[in-house]
Image (tube, rainbow, N blue to C red):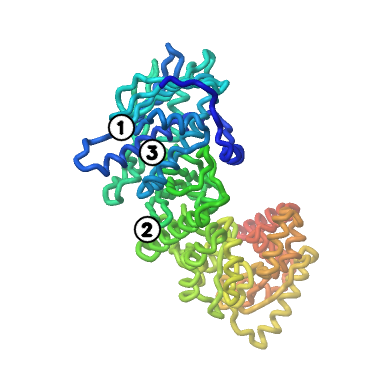
Amino acid sequence: MVQSGMLSIESKNIFNILKKWLYTDQDIVFRELISNACDAVEKLTNITEKKENSPGYEGDISVKLDIENKCLIISDNGIGMTYDEVQKYINQIAFSGATDYINKNNQTGIDTIIGHFGVGFYSSFMISNHVAIETKSYRKDKKPVRWDCHMDMSFSMNEGIRTEAGTDVILYLDEDSVYLKNPKMILDIIKKYFIFSKTKIFFEAPDIQKQLVNITEPIFRLSTNLINTEEMNLFYREFFDDVSDPLFWFKFESIDIGVRGILFFRNTKNNTEELDGKIKVYSRGVYVGENIRGLIPKFVNLQSGIIECDNLPLVVSRNTIREENSQENILTLISECLAQEVTIYLNDMFEKRRDQYEAHWPNINAFVKYSILQDKTFASVMTRKAVFMDLTGKYYTIKEYIEKFGGPEGNEIYYSSDAVDQAYYIGIFKRCGLNALLFDHVIDQPFMQRYEVLNPSVKFIRIDSNIEALFNGEMTEKDVKNSEIVENKFKNAIGSRIGNIRLKVSNLQHESISAIIINDEKARRMADMMEIYGLIKATNFSDRKIQAKSTLLININNNIVRFILNSNNEETLNIIINQLFDLALLNQQALEPEDIEAFVNRSEALLIRTINC
């Protein structure tokens, strides 16, 4: 039974190794060896379950760091190997024990076995110059085997000492090994890759008592009706290192493509917290990666979650997804599945739990709109479910707003992009019994533009743009004549300060409006875009007025304007008209610095006149 020799490499597989297997860090050693142990346990579990009246079997794995003997031992009580199997799967590098097993037991094996034992096992030599195996097959008539191998590829095989079925992989470490100096590194690696493994994994070291490393029954795998919300929130905070509870969460599963998981919608504190989330991906209990491109839709990455995939096409080292030859383009199928699950959940919340949807809206606002811009599947459903707060604090979809408030032509949406900067115009709307929506998030402008492209009949009008139609009264022949007088008095008083701002006198129904500046909607949007791209400086008010096609709208139905019409006191008219003009500029955030001193002095003069009266 004693044998020694040099390892042979199966030539037909060596090119696959070189092409698909490139190890980049030493974590691979633990990921491979523990995965192999999980495979061995899974194999014996499958065999035991098929036997009638078989004794109960519970597999487990232990990882032990023996500093005194300078070795790391990874043990399992799984299926074990015979002398011939060691010869085949270990000595002939690049045979896969798991693949061979699946071929013989294809009923369940392909859904449960990850490994490529023969290939991945040799990652052991990344941290050890001498590796040994003590193994015993579950077959009662087979003897245990001891296998030793060194870096020069010389090996020996003889009878082993193991008495129970299973395998010990023994890695003899150098004195300066980082793992001998810092055992916690091993513990952290095991937790990272196997925290949700279904097989119990224990770790012990001289300064670390034997402890269960993984969570074999994590809360997110339980049936939804068995999950305690407080426990789930605690799990989320600890696992994703978040100080806040999730807003909400939902589980999903697609049996057809072998994917399941849980998605947590994060509390971004009204979008003041970091926007990117963490989607952790596992393949049959082994950690593969986070936020994997091509697997996770870009918009879903804004949230956090756990995804378990049965059929990921992994390279041999299990830490990278192989893009070529994927089963029916499995990556695309999983990505589409995730997009659909998020869409269905939010749509159901809107349709069935509108109050809850609106309560969460300040936190999911940016996510929903960004997702609409990014994903066609999501957009096809959720564009109609985006809501906006109105001036009274109620939420409306665009369709709901048009049906209730629609404007003169029935298809206009009046909106405010900044409740503070446009407070004066908001006040006008409220006084006049009009309503508008708040488009005050940075993503609202691209959302609005996309909506207009898809719905050409809909018009978005900012409350300081093109709103004259809302207030227009009838201009009588007398009003037309008087408007010429008022216009001339404004031009004379304001002088060159008027610049390129157009003057227009109108008879507005609401007499509380004296003089306001309005802008052409399309021209103003162009001015905003030019400012964003640096073509107009934010402080260059003159260029902005020109580009925005601004108009000073004067209401002849207002008492102050009537006073201007009937007064011939040039000094008084100069003060009042310039004051009205500056107030209109202030409401547009467009009063130039050189005019502020004159505005303050004029305001004081008006106060003095009031006192003297």
Q: Which residue occupies the foreground of this view, 236 or 91?
A: 91
Tell me how far mark 3 sits from mark 1, CA to CA: 30 Å
Instruction: Assign a secondary structure to mark 2.
Output: helix
In this view, the residue farthest toward the left is: 53
In the image, residue 167 above or below residue 96: above
Please state the horizontal and vertical placement of residue 21, each as a whole percent of the image. Answer: 57, 37
In the image, residue 63 above or below residue 388: above
Please state the horizontal and vertical placement of residue 328, each as a whole percent of the image. Answer: 51, 57
Give the label on residue 356, or none: 2
Q: Are marks 3 and 2 in contact (CB under 8 Å)?
A: no
Looking at the rendered image, the disc whose residue lies closer to the viewer, 3 or 1, is 1
Looking at the rendered image, the disc whose residue lies closer to the viewer, 2 or 1, is 1
Which residue sits at x=62%, y=59%?
612
Q: Which three-letter amino acid code belongs to the residue tagged 1?
A: Arg
Classify residue 457 as left or right of residue 204.
Answer: right
Which residue sits at x=46%, y=35%?
117
- Residue at the disc numbered 3: 196
Tell me how far mark 2 sits from mark 1, CA to CA: 59 Å
> Counting residues from the N terminus, which is met first, the one under dot 3 or under dot 1?
1
Q: Which three-letter amino acid code belongs to the residue tagged 3?
A: Phe
Looking at the rendered image, the disc whose residue lies closer to the viewer, 3 or 2, is 3
